[in-house]
Image (cartoon, rainbow, N blue to C red):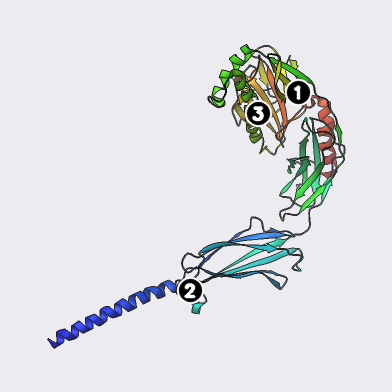
Amino acid sequence: MKAKKINLKLGIIAVGCALIILPLAWFLMVRLEGEQPTLELDLVSPYIGSSHELTIALSDTKSGLRSLWVGLLKDGKEVVLHESDFPSAGLFKGGRLKQTSVKVALAPQKLGFGDGEAILRMVVLDYSWRDWWKGNKTYLERTVVIDTRPPEIEVLSRAHNINQGGAGLVIFRTSESCSQSGVQVGDKFYSGYGGFFADPLIYLTFIALGYEQGRDIDMRVRAVDPAGNRAESSFYYHIRRKVFRKDTINLSDGFINRKIPEFASQISPGASTSAVDAFLEVNRDLRKANYQRIAAVCQKPVQQMHWRGSFLRLPKSATRARFADHRTYFYQGNPIDRQVHLGIDLASVANSAVPAGNAGVVVLAESVGIYGKTVILDHGYGLFSMYAHLSQITVNVGDPVARGDKLGHTGSTGMAGGDHLHFSMLVGDTFVNPVEWWDLQWIQNNVTQKIQSAQSTTGKE
């Protein structure tokens, strides 16, 4: 009996010890956890300009975040960029913050650092009791390049005589490789492309003036280096003002009733109260959506000049509408809409074969709203040609085509009143006058001679 009482007491003691020791052991294991906090630096480029902001993401899901230290070391000199202590939730609970992000401003010149390589150091600690209550530590080091000098720009092309609604070419050289370069024309930016010349720092940029951009438009070459330093340079240019034709289009009930059903799936169902309202929705809203589709296709041109010489015009064709005709649409004697025609309409024999204006790659071959069945060719470095209202398309996206290859046949799809080809030229997403690109002398004066001049002084392609 006495032995049983002793065993019972020992059992009670063992259970009591277990109830105390096991939770304590579990608690100590939690507080002594050895998982390191995570530290991620949002640094897309190793280059640091005159003013830079670092974003550092921190996380520790177990003990919570204790502190962050950031420093910059160069030529034996180290400067603390940031120090922060994160709040505690109490002695036994760890840190309040499990994750956060910290922004650190970095202005090397103000800190007394010159250009060149430097080391960015970062240390984050958590609230673990490891390492005698100092916590788990994550150390991250990154080599960066301080670059506070903006690139230099030298414009190599000389004469830039540009027609309102026309195109041009600017050739320039930068003193260093740039993450972005090109020409700003008013509120539009046209990217520069390297790789054409032997010198990789020489860029060519096809630019455009919209039909609405006049002589007051400012043009400048702009460049941004990998560190974010910006530079710009003016250049000589002369803008020739153009007066565009005004055109009147009288809409008949027959035309509207014949055409609008083609767009039933592309306009708001039930939103239009009449055929005329539906026409206006197509002519205004759908036209804008169609332009966005065309612009999207022209965002990433091939960086190779496929084309040579003048562009072909539809053979044996007559001009029915001109570039930038300012059209007023009349219905029953009243003006109901105004739009600008961004191409040239060419009429020949019905269902005529449509040739590629020049060598390029097919980047669009589909129906595009008011333009009907449409083909767009990418000729390289931001130059595109467009063929619309086709009755049939005979090429596919990705097909390479040579000058004169058949793309399809003329037709009256889309908002066309009869069989014809709507032909457009674009620089980037800006429609320009196709007449220039049919003119071999214009191309020689404004493109070919500029390239040859740059090659003669800088090296061959």
Give the residue number, with chain letter if any, for mark 1: 326
Camera-side residue: 286 or 146? 286
Horizontal and vertical percent for residue 96?
A: 50, 67
Taking 334 as reference, is 12 above or below it? below
Camera-side residue: 281 or 323? 281
- Callout 1: 10 Å neighbours few (<14), some, many (20+)? some
Quarter of the image containing the C terminus? top right
Give the residue number, with chain letter if any, for mark 3: 376
Where on the picture, by quarter, is residue 267? top right
- Residue 411 appears left or right of 427: left
Mark carried by residue 250: none
Horizontal and vertical percent for residue 114?
A: 77, 65
Res. 302 in view? yes
Give the residue number, with chain letter if any, for mark 2: 90
Horizontal and vertical percent for residue 61?
A: 47, 64
- Which residue type does callout 1 highlight? His
Quarter of the image containing the N terminus? bottom left
**Residue at the bottom extreme, as displayed:** 2
Please state the total of marks drawn on the protein image: 3
Q: First in sequence: mark 2 or mark 1?
A: 2
- Which residue type does callout 3 highlight? Ile
